[in-house]
Amino acid sequence: MRHLKLFSFHQVIFLLLCLFIACKQNPNTVLAPNSTCPQDLLTQYHQTVLLGASDSLQFTQIVSLIKNTPPTCLDIAIDSFSKKISGLWYNNPQLNAQVIELYSFIGNNRAYSHTVKAKAFLALSSIFSKQKKLADTDSALALAVKDSAGFNSNMWMSYYNRLGLNYFYQNKMKEATELFTKGIALGEKEHSTNIALSNLYTNVGTLYNQIGDAKNAIDIFKKNIQFIESTTNDINSITDNLSNIGTVYGAVLEQFDSAIAYYEKGLVVQQRNKAHDNQDPVFTLLINIASIFKDRKQYDSARYYQAFAAPLFKEIKDPVAQLTFTMNEAVVYAQVRDVSKEVATIKSFLPDFYKDNNLECLQNAYMDLALVCKLQHQYAAALAYHTTLDSIAETMSSDKNKQIIHEMNVKYETAKKDLQLKEQQQAIAKKELLIGSLLALLIVGILASVLYTTLQKLKERKKETIRQQQFTTQLIAQTEEERSRIAQDLHDGVSQELMLLKENTHSAGAVVTQKIESIIQEIRNIARNLRPEMLDKIGLSKSVEYLCEQMMEAHQIFISTNISFNEPISKETDLQLFRIIQESLTNVIKYAQADAVNVSITQKNNSIQVAIKDNGKGFPVTETLASGKSFGLHSIIQRAKAIKGEAFITSSLQGTIIKIDLPLTTIKI
């Protein structure tokens, strides 16, 4: 089976480029003014681009306008002019020499910017590429890249695209693929929406198709369709890619029903094209479907699609498309009417095919000529054509073998390069792993050192805290022992002496006796405060109640108690709790200006909880503890710690609460 895309790769690629440049861009785009280019000139440029005169007249007017345009204005107008020129040149190849002259004038004019000159040389490279003037194409691209200071990402993509095509024409597939891929990578990195990226996708897909890599060809054409739909949504561009996918299914995979399905999808898409400004895509789709039915010998169906393509024939400029239509006509109408005119047209192409060594087109042409003769029962002529076909087939087989060898070499070189790249990446990964491991070890070492130092400091702090706690506990114990001794001395010594003195001074009068009694009572109070003797005799509960009664009598303050616990506790705990309550009540009387206090000692779960609550004016707890003038509060905290308990002090304008929480496991007898 034969399809349009298989005849001449460079012609098809050029056709695609021209269609993208000349047909798909909107020529009605209004040029944006700036301070260096007046609006009236821009209006004149816009009107010139929209000219409807003959190709030659339009081109002459554009050339005149460009040569008289200030350089700064051409910076703005060059893209619109180039699109128009490309369209005129595609429609009228006779303008070729004049177009080359114009672009050479722009590219070599020092008055123009780097960007304008580079764009002119890129346009020149496209023209030379079409003409297969490979050396001239290289020269134009070299001149363009000299002005690469004016390149943007879109221009770089165009450069890679055209240089890649030049390598392809020289059968340097590897270099062509690398350049196309480089351009695509740039466009995708920049998130380009420019048509240059679409051209690159098209060329890569066509290259895959050329070497028989159907899967990658189809994938890249589908990717191009998604790109176009998300950017320009150009109907002709979408149609071209659907046609390309159909060609891959038909020519490479020989899945003809799938090929027809994609061609028909293209025709459906073309129904949205209201402008009908370019009939090439529709014509291509129709003759490709006709070719499939022709190869299936379903000539009625083939004639059906040929009949739709016939009215468009005169508008088609591409000779490859024209020849495909003519070859289809000769075969499908061979049994219906005289096709000598079509046969003569096919034969007229043969010298050019021999000259260009285009064996594939020669084979297709002789195959159709032989088939026409067979259908018309001209068997001798058919045999002659088949004989020629055999010699071409042998040559093609040899060339095919060379192509296969070349493709294998390309794949080998690519695989070799991939392996080298992989080895380099592995070496880099190993170095990075080694460096990372060393850094990790260094970091771990530093962290271990810091952690060890921190732990040592914490241990030292913990030891110091324990030492301080032990010192505080011992100090409190020694203080209580000293108090007990002093209290005992006052009771047994001074108090007894005063009692004797009192007995011996009855004759001294009531005043002296009363004074001695007062001193004795004061000494007893001092002794009791130093060491509550009754604590050992009547226990904590009764001692606290007695203490509260004494303070109520002495200081006119209401003190209530709530004492309820059953567990026996050590004498040391009794003493420290009594001192905490005593200190708390003393602080209330001195500072709180309270009317009432509640003292509670309760047992909850596995702990004894002591609470002293007043309704005084309160105080800032944190600031007071930090002030250094709160010996009483610190004494409460340290006494609680001495018996393995914990003190909690909260205060507000509504009063103060001091709570002591003692675990029973540490205070039971």
Image (cartoon, rainbow, N blue to C red):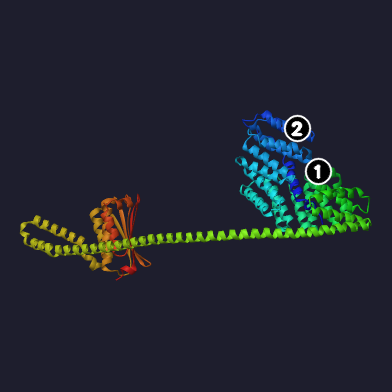
Disc number for residue 317: 1
Residue at point 30% right, 52% down?
626
Q: Earlier in the sequence, mark 1 or mark 2?
A: 2
Residue 63 is at least partly visible in this image: yes
Outermost residue on the left side: it is 507
191 and 138: which is toward the camera = 138
- State how many labels appear: 2
Placement of the C terminus among the 4 image quadrants: bottom left
Q: In this view, does 196 lie above or below 497?
A: above
Q: What element carries label 1?
A: loop
Q: Is residue 595 above or below residue 32?
A: below
List x then y, in percent, for residue 140: 67, 42
The three-letter code of the residue at mark 1 reads Lys
Task: Identify the residue under disc 2.
Answer: 60
Q: What element carries label 2?
A: helix
Placement of the N terminus among the 4 image quadrants: bottom right
330 and 489: which is toward the camera = 330
Viewed as shown, does residue 444 lie left or right of 169?
Answer: left
Query: How packed is label 2: few (under 14 Cα within 10 Å), some, or many (20 or more)?
Result: few
211 and 583: which is toward the camera = 211
List x then y, in percent, for residue 350: 84, 50
Viewed as shown, does residue 667 lie left or right of 370?
Answer: left
Q: In this view, does 99 lie above or below 270?
A: above
Residue 566 is at least partly visible in this image: no
Q: Distance of mark 1 from mark 2, alpha carbons?
A: 22 Å
The three-letter code of the residue at mark 2 reads Thr
304 and 180: which is toward the camera = 180
